[in-house]
Amino acid sequence: MMTFINRLLALFNSYPPASIPEATTIGERVAVPAPFLRVDTVASALAPSLPLPAIAPLPAWLADEESLRDEGVLFGLSYAQPDTKIAQISAFFASEAAPLTELAAQYTGQIRALTPRIDRREKELTSLRDQLTQLRDSQPVRTTLVRHVISLGISIILCMGTFYLVDGTLYRVFPNHWISTGVFLAGLFNMSGHTSFFYETNTRLTGRRFMEEIGLPFAAAVFVLVHALSYQPVSQAIGLFIFILFVFLLSGKLLLSTLTSLQHEMVSAQKNRQMIAAKQVDLPLLESQISQHEQDVDRLNGQRMAVVTAFNQVESTLTQLNTQRDKLVNLFLGEFELARSLRDRLTKQQRQLIMND
C-alpha cells in the first residue's frame, strides 16, 4: 500500500507542471528515530525499595511511524495547525515521564539524607583514629621519684640535727624547748619567695630582696651565737654561727622545694599509671569503635552508591524519553512542513483526492 507522501510524489510526477526540488525526499529531511527504549530494561539496577513505574505501550498513531508521517501530510495539506498533534505527543510522554520524575525526586531525597550521615560518621572516624594514634604514641613521663624521696629524707635528717644543735646551745639559758623550736623555725622558714636567690640565675638582687632572704636567718644565727659565746670558746661559737646560718639560708628552701617537686613527681607517676591502664583498656575499645565506624561508613557509602546509580539510570531513561519525544515531534513536523510547502502547488481537487485516498 502506497503511503500518502508516495502518492503525493506520484501525483506530482503525473502532472509535470508542478516543480519539485531535486534530491529532496522525506527520508533525507527527517532522521528516522531509534527504537523506543522501554524503561523496564533497567529495572534490575534500581533500588528494590522503589520499584520502577510501568511504562504504557505507545499508541498506534505513535508506534507506527508511517501513520505519523501520514498524519503530518494530512495536517500539512489541510488548514489545521500542528499544535494540537504536538501537544498530544508531548502529553503522552509527559504522563509517562511523571512517575520517573517523582522517582528521581525520591532518590534525590535519599541522597541528601545519606550524605550528612556519611559526613558525620567520617568525622567521628577521623576523631577516633586521632585518639588512637595519640594514645599509641603517648609515652610515660620520666620521673625521679626515688631521688626526691631520698633528698627529702636527707633534708629532714639535716633539719632535725640542726634543731638539736640549736636546742643544745640555748638549753642552758632557755630550758624551755619551745624557745629553741621558735628560733629554729624562724631561721629555717623565712618569709621570702618560694625559692632562694642562691638557686636562681640571672636574677637582679635588690636590697629589699637581700633583706628578705638574709635578715631573719641571720638574726636567728646571731641569737644562737650570742648565747653560745657565754659558755663556748669564740672559735667554736663562730663555727657554730656559720654552720647554722648556711643551714638556715639553704636547708629550709631546699626542704620546701623538695616537697613541691615530690608532689609534682607523684602527680606524674599517677598520670603514668593512668596512661598504662588506659592503653590496656581504651586501645581495644577504640579499635573496636573504629572498626564499627568503618563498617558503617562502608555500608552507608554502598547505600548511597546504589541510590546514585539508580538515580543516574532514571535520569538517563528520562533523557531517552525526551529524545524519543523530540524525534517523533520532529518526524511529524518534517512531514507537515513538507506537505504544507507543497499544498499551494496542488489544486483543490488534487488535495481532496489525496486526502480522500
Image (cartoon, helix red, strand yellow):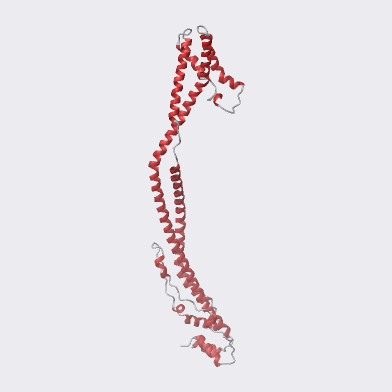
Q: Residue 112's spot in the image, x, y percent?
A: 47, 57
Q: Nearer the viewer, residue 5 or 229?
A: 229
Q: Residue 198's spot in the image, x, y percent?
A: 55, 24
Q: Residue 156's spot in the image, x, y percent?
A: 45, 21
Asked if residue 204 is positioned above or below residue 60 in the image, the reply reads above
Question: For residue 268, what is the image quadrant?
Answer: top left
Q: Nearer the viewer, residue 275 or 24?
A: 275
Residue 349 visible, this orientation: no
Q: Residue 117's spot in the image, x, y percent?
A: 45, 53
Asked if residue 292 is positioned above or below residue 216 in the image, the reply reads below
Q: Nearer the viewer, residue 269 or 296?
A: 269
Numbered disc total: 0
Residue 318 visible, this orientation: yes
Asked if residue 226 is positioned above or below residue 27 in the image, the reply reads above
Q: Residue at x 46, y 77 (%)?
A: 62
Residue at the extreme front of the image, as rendered: 235
Q: Residue at x 46, y 62 (%)?
A: 105
Q: Residue at x 57, y 20 (%)?
A: 212
Q: Residue at x 47, y 66 (%)?
A: 315
